[in-house]
Structures are given as C-alpha cells and as structure tokens.
Amino acid sequence: MYYLSAIKANSHLNVFLEVYEAEALQRAQEIDRKIAGGTQGRLAGMVVGLKDVISHQDHGLQAGSRILEGFRAQFNATAVERLLAEDAIVIGRQNCDEFGMGSSNENSAFGPVRNGADPSRVPGGSSGGSAVAVQTGMCLASLGSDTGGSVRQPAAFCGLVGLKPTYSRVSRWGLIAYASSFDTIGIIARSVPDAALLLEVIAGKDDYDSTVSQSPVPAYSRQLRLDEKPRIAYIPETIQSAGLSEEIRQTILRNISSLKEDGHRVDAVVFPLLDFILPAYYILTTAEASSNLARYDGVRYGYRSTPAGSLESMYKSTRSYAFGEEVKRRIMLGTFVLSADYYDAYYTKAQKVRRLIKEKTDNIFAQYDFLILPTAPTTAFRLGEHTEDPLKMYLADIYSVQANVAGIPAISIPAGKDQNGLPIGLQIMANRFEEARLLAFAHYLMQHQ
Amino acid sequence: MPSHEIRSAYEAVIGLEVHCQLQTRSKVFASDAVVFGSQPNTNISVITLGHPGTLPKLNRTAVEYAIRMGLACSCEISRYNIFDRKNYFYPDLPKGYQLTQDKTPICRKGSVTVRLKDGSHRDVIMNRIHLEEDAGKSIHLAGEPDTLVDYNRAGTALIEIVTEPVIRTSEEAAAYLTEIRKLVRYLDICDGNMEEGSMRCDANISIMPKGSKVLGTKVEVKNMNSIRNVQRAIDHEIDRQLNETEKGNAIFSETRTFDAGNGQTYSMRIKETMNDYRYFPEPDLAPLVVSEEWLESIRAAMPSLPQELHRRFVNDYGLPDYDAGVLTDSRETADYFEEVCRHTKNYKAASNWVMTAVKSVLNERNLHINDFPVGARELAGLISLVDSGKVNHTIASQKIFPLMIQHGKSAAAIAEENNLLLQSDGGILQTLINEVLLSNPEKVKEFKKGKKALLGMFMGEVMKRSGGKADPKLTTELLGKTLKEI
C-alpha cells in the first residue's frame, strides 16, 4: 500500500509513534467489499492519521509524553468514532509536542519530528507529525489539535491546508486537554475539499461534550463555491511588524493587491489589542493546563516512579521525571497566575482582556467577512534554533492565537515558497460558525493564486 | 473548666457547613451507578477515573434535588450557574480538582426555623447551598504499608449547605442539624445518615466579648459523626477557646478534629499552611441555566414540608402544638397519621395512637413505619370500635392492638373472635348485677343507708365477673335502677 511504503521510506522524519499496519490493511479489505456492495461511508478508504492527543479505543495514547507510558485508550474520541463510522482508515498515531505545548515539535518525549521539505528544519508544532505525515504522503489527512495555532502553523511550515474550526464546532470528547476553553480538534489536509469533507463528518452536537455547539452542520464539501465577493480586512500592524520575514510580508501584500485587482473590497482595519493577545493567551492557557494536567499523578494510570517514601515524594518524582521541560514550565506558570496573591493581577485581568479581544474581533466581523494575515512570522526554522529561548518560541504563535482567544475559525493555506524553497502560509479568519464561507474563500484563493 | 466570669463575658459564634450526599441513581457528572456497599471500584468509568480526554456531563436530577432543598429553605435560586474547579492533589481525587460552585451557588441566602427545648423558635440564616462532587475513599488496612483507593464514591453528587455565623449555642446547632436532616428526608434527596457519612457536618467556632461587632478567630472542627457529637464537640471547643483566652493565649486559625472517645478536639493543621485551591471556572461544562419552566416544575413536584404539615395538623386537625411536632418528625409518620385521618374523624385519638402505641412498637422492634404491620385503615377501625362503645380503651390497647400486630386482622374481627366486645346485653348484665347484689347483702344495706361510694365497689364486681367486658354505661344504668328498686 502506497501510504505504508511512504511511512517506511520516511522513518527518519520520526512522524509516527505507532503504525497500525495489519489493522489498516484488514480494514481496507473490508471497505473494498463495502464499496463493491455499494454500502460504503462518505470517507470510504480515506487514510487518516491521528495526533497522539486523540483517543482511539484499544490503541496507545500518550500525548507525546512519558507520563502516559503504556497507556491505552478505553474509548474513541467522538471525532474518531465519526471517522470510523464513515469508513475512514486510521493508519497510526502521530508524534507531537508534549500535550500540544510547543511550536516546533521539539518538545516530544519521542524526539523531534523533521520537516519533509528540509529535514534540518522543524515541521512546526504542536501537530508536527500530523503535518509531515500529509506532506510526505504517509496519509491523506490528519486530525490534529489547535490550542494556539498547532494545526495552522505546521500546515504553513509544510505547505498544507490547516483548518481550526470554531471553538465548540467539534466535540472535544476524547481530545486530551491542554487548555479546555481554547482547544479544538483541527484538520490538516492537502486540499480544501478534503478538509471540508472531514469537518462535515466530525463536527456537530455530541452528548458527551456539554460545551459543543448544537447548531446544525452544513454540507461544507458541497458549498465550496464563493457566491458573492466578500469584504476582506487586514490589520496593517500584522504586516508591518518587524518580526515578520520580508518574503512573507511580500506574499501577503501580493495577495491583498491581487484581491483588490479582482474587484474585492480589502480594507485596513484598526485592532488596538494586538500586543495583548499573546500575554492573555499564555496566562489563560497555562492556568487551565496546570489544572488539566493535575490528573497525571502516577496514581491510577501511566507512569509512576519506583516506590518512594511518601505520597508527596511519589507525586514529585513521578511528575518531575515524566513531564518535559516545557510542560513543567507551563504548569508552574499556570499555578502561579492562579495563586491567591497573583490571581487578580494575572488571571482575572487576562480574562478581561480575552473578553475585550473577543469584542474587538466581533467588531471586525460585523463589517467584514474575512481577516487576512500571515500564519507565522517565519518559514520553518532550524531544529534547535529557538529551543534556548522560550519567549522567542512563543512568538511563533503571534498570528495564530487570536482565533483561539476569540473562538473563531481560521485556516492556513499554502501561498508559495521562500528563496530556500520553504512553504509560506497565508491565514484567513472568519466569524464564528462561518466555516462554510471560510472554506469557500480559501478554496477560491488556492485556485486563483 | 473556664471560670464563670469569662463565660459570662464572652459569647460563641458558630457557623455550620453540612454536606449531604444526594440519592441520585447516577453520579453528578457521569452515568456510573450510585450504589452503596458494592465491591470497591465497580461503579467507575473513564469519567470517574479522570482518563485523558474525558469531559463531565451534568446530571439534571442532582440539580433538581439541590433546588428542592433551596426551595424548602426559602433560598433564591441562581438562574445562571457556573461550576468551578477546586484544585488540590490527593489520590482519592481523580482529576486533581473537585468540581464545585464557588462564585455562583445554585441557592443563595434562605433560612431554617428551629425549635429549642424551651419552646422558643429561632431562624438560622443560611449563606448558600451549592452542588459539588464527592471524592473517593482512601483505605488503610492494618499492617499494610500501601494505601488503597476506592473510587465508587468519587463523583457522587453532594450539596453543601452553609449557614451564616449566626448560631450561638450547641443546642441551636443540634436543633438546626435535626431540622436539616428532617428536611432532606422529607424531600427524599438524602438519607441523612451521619453515622455512615451520607450527611457530614463541619463547624466553624469562635468566641468574642459579649456584644462585640468583631468576630473572633474561627476554628474549624471536623469528624463528628452524629448530631450528639456535633453538640459535644462545640461545647468542648467553646470551653477550650474560653480557657485559652482566660490564660491570655491567642486562638489560632486552624482545623481541629473531634475525638468521640474522649470528647476532645485536636489540631490537624494550621490554616497558613493550607492549600491555595486556585479556583477558576470549569471550562469543560456549559453554564447551567435554570429556566422559569424548569423551576416551576420542580416547585410543583415538591412534597409537603414539615412546617406546612405542622401548620395543617394544628389548624385542620385541631391538634396541640406538641402533637403536631411529634407527628411531623418524619414524613412517613406524618403520612401514616394523615392516612389514618382519612378513615376516622377522631383526629386527637389518631394522634394519641400514633404518638404512643405505634411509636413504642416501632422503637421496641426497631421497625420503620413503612413496615408497620397495622395499616392506617385498620388503626382507624380500632379507633371507631372504641368510639362506638363496643370495646373500651384498655381492651383496645392491651388486647386488640397487640393481636392486630400479630395477625394483621381488623379490630372488629379480633374483638369478635376473642370475645372482647363489650357486654351490652341487658339480660346478661342484669343477671350479673343480681348475683353481685345477692352475694353482698350487708353492703347493699349500707348503700341504702347512704354510703353511695359503694356503687363503685358493685361496678367493680360486675366488671370482674364480666371479664372486663361489661359495657360501663349500660351497667351503671342497670345497677342504679336495681339498687333503687330493692
């Protein structure tokens, strides 16, 4: 099978943590029979990979962490259940940054994933394995997760389509939580129609997730025609920013002018809160993470350090050993911002800022259909380039976190390559639950670039 | 013991926190069964165990139970509820945080009226009732170095009922707890069993100079597994604080545990070193909105409350305050009484029977009233039998009632079969009277001379010969007539 041989040929990229070869082949045969009988599902034969944060019953699940050593999932994530019901084939689980915390896929207990375009470079993160798997033909599409850009940024680094749906559009049942009020399951695919079809299948209400939206799911894959000329906004500061690579700047500007030439309305808009998005994001996500990751304590499952003298020393040695640097950094940050003495100065204030960002973002979408901006400030950087400086690494998310803070859908599409042949991503955001138009516009842009 | 001086110079301030385990069929955020006495770790699921990727799902029945309690205590019901995470590490807490309501308790304010021994009433003002989940149980077996954890209880629905610091004495505290226990049982939301821990109480206790506006440093006392022990623990803790104050020592903010064995409290931990729980809104649960329709349907389904029944028993049945209090002690007793009253109009007699004869049998045999062998209709039958004059009260309570308990037959049938109906056949009674008078000629003479008190003696003799069954009214009448005619 084509995908299995691609996986074998590219094992140096460290993409899959486990490949379900026999199972996938067996399922392929069953689905072939269904196709012969005309009873196949909508995804019949589509080979997908799962980021190692998505629960797949009776399969390993570790969130790229030692703390879940030996853990096997006892249930299917709702998204996985729906993929399987439509006859998709799950080929394996994919390497990622530990618990989705990272922008380069260098924070995995299983070692970094390498970019298929240049193995000395990172694939982006945290869904790095999921992106490279699609990039190198190991599967047709991947389910990843996006808390601050973890699907879009690797898609940009690998020249793919990365879709982060509206918060609550896809059930989080079975998605290992990093920051619950930001987390979404996202899709990495080669084309917009593939992403649209997958979203159509996995989205929608679910009894297991009380926060999921009850609103009906449109047939995205059949609504990919842009019926009218949309109104488009951009925030000049995001393009003028000193941290943005010149080639990406030119790419975005080129896109803006060609849209104008095609008769679209494209306006510069004011968004005064840009500098506050990243701080608010890191305060709130680390706060939620510090609590979400408390369950990994060595008591009920996963890794436990060898017998220690007391309960407290068991907790300490288990968590100190089995969590990686970045995860520990975020747990400490989050615990700090929630602690009684600093709660109001950080957590409460960040909540207020989040509300303001939502309001200001809503204001843009009251007048415009889409917001265009870069996906990331640079193209894929070299392994080890930012590992010494977490702040620099955090800046990799500067353009992507707004969608998570505001809960809106966003997509990254390929927009050419830089002089080193590295893919550049263009990002489009839309109003909540406007995935149909977002996908249609992304499809249009990919065809007209 | 603190001196009389300090005792009269200071007053105590007490606030209570009561946890009640709700009798919902499934857990508050998962569908696992809530069953007591199961094998350890059998009523668990991936949600209860906090497996990665799981999310809580709110049990609406638990919400309804909490609202019932709130309505019973005249609370304001919050229409928009957010759950919060209370973060701390413990092996019996699977997620590393407890889901609770910190900022938006489902019920706010409210009060409960309690009756004290001297007959006075007091309103205990409440701060809140909120919903939360219980933790599992850590088990330490003797001789075993390991701790075992049973997660069956983890995720069971609890309400925490918190009073304002308005209670002044241990007697008030006990009366309040008795009332809360009565309410949760009436509402059928919790079995109120403190010994088994389905109802738990922590007390916050401080002392301050009488009339002061500033509360003293409060001490939290835990581990009291009966209302009686709460009362003892409060008394002891007030004395301890008075003693310390008298010695010039400061009271520390701390948590103390009560030892029922010797009635003392012991320090568990000082508050400064306690957990910072880092509460924040639970992002995994949608806000709980209580609609007007839902609230109305809960209100409509509320059972009668003890105060309402008390009022009705006094007003409609004309019972004394005392009777109404005893009968409304439990919902089942009140129900039984009302059922009896559906079959008899002699409400006071019904009350007397239920309060005395029925209650003492229940106590002796350790029975619940629902298992009492004499049905309400049958008890009413016995009352009618007495009222109609066919049996007297002594025979009814000493002979017929015990047989009814044994055989479950109707009072009339038992009286008939056992020949216990009053003798009201004038002919038979006349024969007995004649026999008695003939065998006591001297006494008859004395009576005729004016010693009227002898009438009682003749009555007694006739009664004796009739085996206690002579109809007293008819006998008196015939006896008087016969004596006059002699």
Image (cartoon, rainbow, N blue to C red):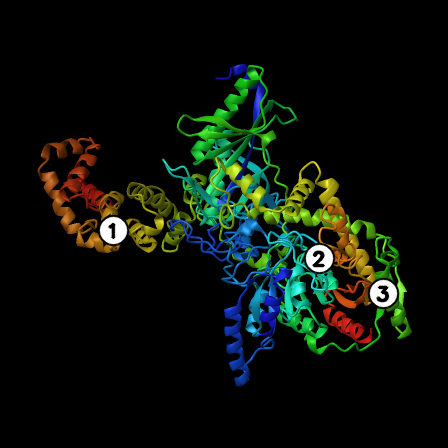
A428 and B262: which one is in front? A428
Task: State the residue position of label 2.
Answer: A122
Sequence-wise first label, 2 or 3: 2
Which circle, 2 or 3, is nearer the viewer? 2
Q: Are marks 3 and 1 on the same chain?
A: no
Residue B236 in picture, x, y percent from top left: 48, 25
Where is residue A403, by image quadrant?
bottom right
B134 and B277: which one is in front? B277
Q: Are marks 2 and 3 on the same chain?
A: yes
Task: State the residue position of label 1.
Answer: B404
- Give the amino acid type for the residue marked by disc 3 in the picture: Thr
Q: Are marks 1 and 2 on the same chain?
A: no
Residue B160 in picture, x, y percent from top left: 54, 43
Viewport quadrant of the N terminus of chain A: bottom right
Which circle, 3 or 1, is nearer the viewer? 3
Q: CA distance from mark 1 to mark 2?
A: 89 Å
**Secondary structure type for disc 2:** loop
Query: Which residue is at 82% across, 53% downward?
Result: A274
Query: Which residue is at 67% across, 64% downward?
Result: A132
For label 1, the crowd category at 10 Å Cα-Cα, with few meaning under 14, some 14 to 19 and many 20 or more, is many
Give the residue furthest to the bottom: A37
B324 and A307: which one is in front? A307
Disc marking residue B286: none
Instruction: Give the number of marks.
Output: 3
**Secondary structure type for disc 3:** helix
Task: Mark yes or no: residue A352 visible.
Answer: no
Residue A300 in picture, x, y percent from top left: 49, 48
Task: State the residue position of label 3.
Answer: A251
Q: CA distance from mark 3 to mark 1?
A: 97 Å
**Secondary structure type for disc 1:** helix
